[in-house]
Amino acid sequence: MGIFPSQRKVTGYDPLAFTVTINTGRCMFCSKDGEVTMPSHAWELYADGEGQQIQYAWPEGSMGEREQVMNGTHPACFAEMFPPPPEEEDTQSVNYANGDTP
């Protein structure tokens, strides 16, 4: 479970762009602080006490950005912790054009 939105700190607000900058705290992987800038309406939906889940409040945000808002883990650190699985070599394919037989 991530940090409660009330434990996050809004460090900036741009009324012309309708964005807020959120201090996401210390990354559990690299131990560095981080920030995410997101639409102010999405933050309000997520952080209002009975907030929506982040993927519904901010669907246009990347998975990495949303993860960082929830638990402080930077997108690059998250990708390093959970790399995509290696592709398996297809040993079952048969190429009849090259004379292979089933």
Image (cartoon, helix red, strand yellow):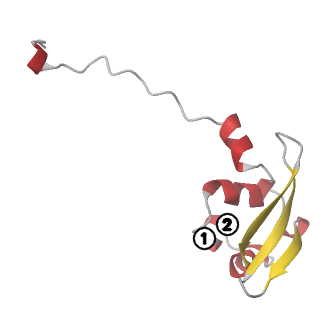
Crowding at mark 1 (Cα within 10 Å: few <14, some 14-19, many 20+): few
Left or right? Give the position of 95 relative to 13.
left
Which is nearer the eye, 1 or 20?
20
Q: Is the residue marked by circle 2 packed among few (<14), some (14-19), or many (20+) residues within 10 Å?
A: some
The x and y percentages for residue 24 are: 84, 59
Residue at the spot of label 1: 56
| SS category of the residue bearing label 1 | helix
- Residue 89 position, x and y percent, is 38, 21
Kind of residue at disc 2: Ile
Between residue 60 and residue 53, name the one nearer to us.
60
Residue 54 is labelled as 2
Name the image quarter holding residue 53. Answer: bottom right
Position of residue 12 in the picture relative to residue 36 (left or right): right
- Residue 32 vertical placement versus 50 (above, below): above
Which residue is most to the bottom? Answer: 16
Q: Quadrant of residue 95?
A: top left
| CB under 8 Å between discs 1 and 2 | yes
Task: Identify the image quadrant of the C terminus.
Answer: top left
Query: Total of numbered circles in the picture?
Result: 2
For residue 76, say whether it is visible.
yes
The answer for how far apart the CA atoms under marks 1 and 2 are is 5 Å
Q: Residue at x 69, y 36 (%)?
A: 80
Q: Which mark is residue 38?
A: none
Q: Position of residue 58 (x, y in %)?
A: 63, 70
Residue at image position (55%, 35%) is 84
Q: Residue placed at 70% from the left, 55% from the top?
A: 67
x 67%, y 66%: residue? 54
